[in-house]
Image: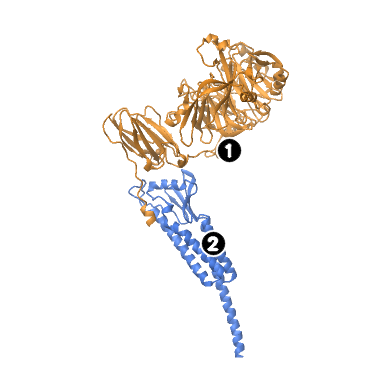
Amino acid sequence: MTSSRRTRWHACALAGLLVAAAACGPARPNTSMAGASDAANRVYVAPGAKDEFYAFMSGGFSGQVSVYGLPSGRLLKVIPVFAQNPENGYGYNVETKALLNSSFGNIPWDDTHHPSLSQTDGAHDGRWLFINANNTPRFARIDLATFETVETIEVPNTGGNHGAPFVTENSEYLIGATRFSVPIPQADVAISDRASKFKGTISFVKANEAGKMDIAFQLLVPGIDYDLGRPGKGPSHGWAFFTSYNTEQAFTKLEVNASKNDYDYIAAVNWKALEACAAGGKARSWPARYAHNVMSHTTHQATTEFKTAVNVIDPKDCAGSIYYLPTPKSPHGVDIDPTGEYIVGGGKLATVIPVHSFSKMMKAIEEKAFEKDVEGIPVLAYAKVMAGEVQNPGLGPLHNEFDDKGCAYTSVFISSEIVKWCFSDFKVVDRVPTYYSIGHLMVPGGDTKKPYGKYVVAMNKITKDRYLGTGPELTQAGQLYDISGAKMKLLLDFPLIGEPHYAQAIDANLLKDKETKFFTLADNAHPWATKREQDAGISRQGKTVHVKMTAIRSHFAPDNIEGVQVGDTVLFHVTNLEQDWDVPHGFAAMGNWSDAELLVMPGQTRTLTWIPKYPGVYPFYCTDFCSALHQEMMGYVRVSPAGRAVALQANVPRPAAAPPAAGKR
Amino acid sequence: MLPLRSRILLAAAAILMAGMFVFPIWSVALSAPQYPEGLAMDIRINTITGRTPNDLGNINNLNHYIGMKRIEPDTIRELRLMPYVVAALAGLALLAAATGRRSLAWVFAGCLAVFAVAGLADFWWWTWDYGHNLDVENAIIRVPGMSYQPPLIGTKQLLNFTATSWPAAGGLFAFAAAGLTGLAIWFARTDALRQRHAAAAVAAVTGAERVA
Ligand SMILES: [Cu+2]
């Protein structure tokens, strides 16, 4: 960095323009592509050719996950997770609704932040993707064969599930931490009693078996705010690290009152010790109420189990399970390098990037090099655990990802740039602007033992002049940089869904041969599945009318329904009889005010709830252009006034008479 | 008696015919813009199967647009007969090879020829029937003058589908068996002729002696 630029930095900082720093930062050209045609070649994936990586981007306040191809930046799919998705009926239809169940009821929306790919031996294994719900604390599992949400679990005793769900190196646990401390267990107390009455928790959720997520144990921690976390790897496997802020324990005007201390902490948690303590009976079972929801790919239905207790461990009962590493100025991210030795903080208000050493930390623990303790938790001496400080990292370093050559890439929010530095000397070797206000960044495999080191993706909060304007609400965006050489090069801008927080990317070869193309109809164990047209039909249970319906190119069976009355609730159980790839059928009935449409995959059964309000004859139709005769794929349901005696009937085709021609000819 | 090499060839023909029980005899493959991965059905000695478990169902589902009958292997009488016919033929070949009886070889060759011609004719007729006897009343797509008979051998465009039909491994074995049988018969004939010439020469010599 030149001295004149450094002066600019200081001037900016002094001017207190920390937040509106788009105007500060290094002077930059509007584009910095090293040669547009070279960049275009690097990201061009020819029609019909496929991308090298699947990138899973959190949808932030959209509650979803979006799947992009890299390097092209092409959107492949939006996976609904913690928000209803009218596009395919997720969270509306009877089958998927339960995935949104919580102890607060069925929640139509949440805020997803951090996708985390399952790992084996510290590398991606392509089984699952996990993601958190930040608002009402939950975790989700997405199956990477179907790209569908298959399991969600609520995390009790947590306020703001932000430091989550980062997966341990063999997918033993998802880690999580409470961003906002709250009374634990919840209680009606004065907010001004925060310091004495609020607590935090750090959670370890069993993840290694599909359908069996479980809160293994929660560590009760002092009531400060915990921000982000990362499990250790290699030598530090068995530990997990969490940043904290608001060690001031402020409860009003946090932007000022929680920014006073020069040092907050990174909590180092020894989960192997916690496991041993839990096994040794040191955990206490606390009453709690939380939902665990599982989707079955045989019944095609999600079911909910409410759990009533959770194992809580007090650090006083489990010596050596947690230490605090002093870390400058309200650190945001904490990231572990591929070797597992370095613990990199993101001191978002700090003037350096602090890097701790795991081996030094272990030595300091052994030597009991403690500065003090906080509620019985030893605080290690900063000088004893620090491996180095990266100078001049820019304003507001947040997150770090790593390449395969011993270097780190730090997102720097306020000065809106990516800064590259290496562990060999902790010196900045390159920096590139981002457009604008980068949050997280992602190197494919950049949080694992085996980073790919080809690209880094910036996820930007502000895009202002980068795209055609769209009124007050503008897109947020990704930017793809080439990091294969000594200097980073901007290759591509591409808009993203919702607010991209974190992302993960996986080698496409790990997924492309295992995708589910359709569900096997013979295995469909949905209680209302209809496997042959002649088994379709209609039945009444009091005021509920069940219609068993099939869909195949290009008709529904039945397609004429009579005998429904105002006051009935009609459940259309639609089974897609196709056994071929890429042939979903849609279903919607006029006036389906309580539901969105159904999008039914081949071999699957989905149920639409339809509550007619007025007598009449209402059309229903296939909403997914499935075939040449798609427009003909429709039917009618007749609704009679309550009490009018119209026979219940549905025109189900009878099986054709034994085929005469073929045998006889 | 059959010469040894004819008997070996007939035994080999029988073994090749056994291959028809293992491998598909004929394959009809379909591709279309919507089916870049293709659909295919394999005609086996006693059934018709999809190349993947769902290909036949998907072919039937597509065929309903043009009013074609469903292909139901269980209702096709030829497929019930064919294993017995082929087994009998192979048995006949083995018997001819074992006994070396010329008449058996001739009977076998004749039956095989009849089977081959009748089989191909029947297959052609079967595809003609499926391609032409359409349920026109209920056909969704009706193209005047269009029929949907796939080729016996080769490639043909049927609306959006390109249909390609070729003998598969089992069919090639059958052709090879026919070839070996032809060869066996030819050797049997040439050997017989040679023996007859030799005998005639001997007779001529001995006759001359006797005269002398
Ligand atoms: Cu349809």
Q: Residue A514's image quarter?
A: top right
Q: Is residue B205 above or below residue A213?
A: below
Residue linked to disc 1: A509
Amino acid type, mark 2: Ala
Please name whichever residue, B108 or B160, is drawn nearer the observer in this view of the structure.
B108
Where is residue B116 shown, x and y percent of the image?
A: 47, 62
Point out the residue furthest to the bottom here: B212
Q: Residue A55's image quarter?
A: top right
Assign the C terminus of chain B to one quadrant of the image: bottom right
Q: Mark 2 lies on which chain?
A: B
**Residue B176 badge:** 2
Q: Which chain carries label 1?
A: A
Q: Can residue A409 be seen in this view?
A: no
Please name whichever residue, A35 or A15, is drawn nearer the observer in this view of the structure.
A15
Tell me the colour scheme of the image. by chain
Q: Can residue B169 be seen in this view?
A: yes
Question: Which chain appears orange?
Answer: A
Q: Are marks 2 and 1 on the same chain?
A: no
Residue at coordinates 49% horizontally, 69% vertically from top-left?
B107
Where is residue A298 shown, x and y percent of the image?
A: 48, 37
Point out the residue furthest to the left here: A644
Question: Which chain appears blue?
Answer: B
